[in-house]
Amino acid sequence: MKSLSLASRVKQYSRRLTVLTLATAALLLCNTTIAQTYSIDNLIIDKVFTFATPPGAQTAGGYLTITNTGVEDDTLIGGSASFADVTQMHEMKMVDDIMKMRHLETGLAIPAGATVELTPGGLHVMFMQLTQDLKDGDSPAVTLSFAKAGDLIVNFQVVDRRQQKSGNETKHGHKKSDHSTMNHDSSVDSTTKE
């Protein structure tokens, strides 16, 4: 068995390190948009995404994480999006084996010192009366309105629903939920059987 000289081993190691560095950089570039972090006042917002919609869809859900680093509670009271006529805060939960969705009319509380996750199948931003399709790779701007912190513009990364890990999660670790089959009349609870 032939042994490599020290210079050859260093050169080989250097090539491997370069390949590893380039691979790491490529992975970071791919996840830059999803990993974008926003802040306003004492709020930190990250993991902002929505799913691509089929042509003509009228609704979409928006998902994100909000951390309140302050000593006072705040409330996500609404927002606006150029691609939807209506933007509301919604909650989904299972009640007697039936998935129920409701509009949070007074908004979504963000307690001081807490992190609130808006995820498919749970709390989420509800975009209704869509004026355009959401396409994979897009990142449309949405204004989130907080009672104390004010307005913040964030970009929702649009991801393909088929990029799912397994079961009920996307490749980014978010749970999935299909809003296209639900009644989104804000005056009544929406239900679907799972």
Image: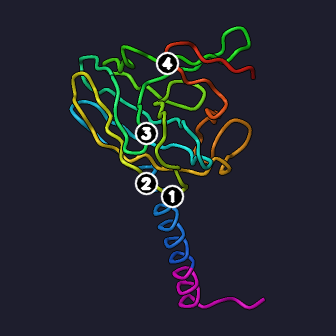
Q: Residue farthest to the right?
A: 1
Q: Which label lies toward us, 1 or 3?
A: 3
Residue at position x 56%, y 87% from top?
6
SS assignment at label 1: loop
* Residue at image mark 4: 186
| Residue that label 1 marks | 137
**Dot 2 corresponds to which residue?**
33
* Residue 29: x %, y % from top left: 46, 63
- Give, as a single range, the part of the protein colored magenta: 1-15
Which label's residue is closer to the chain start, 2 or 3? 2
* Residue type, label 3: Ala
Asked if marks 2 and 4 touch (Cβ < 8 Å), the reply is no
Rendered-image quadrant of the C terminus: top right
Q: What percent of the width, then of the height, locates residue 154? A: 34, 44
Q: Secondary structure at mark 2?
A: loop
Comparing 68 with 62, the one in front is 62
The kind of secondary structure element at disc 3 is strand
> Amino acid under label 4?
Ser
Q: Which mark is residue 84?
A: 3
Q: Please name which of the two marks, 1 or 2, marks the residue nearer to the observer.
A: 1
Q: CA distance from mark 3 to mark 4?
A: 15 Å
Give the mark nearer the N terminus: 1 vs 4. 1
Residue type pointed to by label 1: Gly
- Few, some or many C-alpha atoms within 10 Å of disc 4 (few <14, some 14-19, many ≥20)? some
Circle 1 residues within 10 Å: few <14, some 14–19, many ≥20 = some
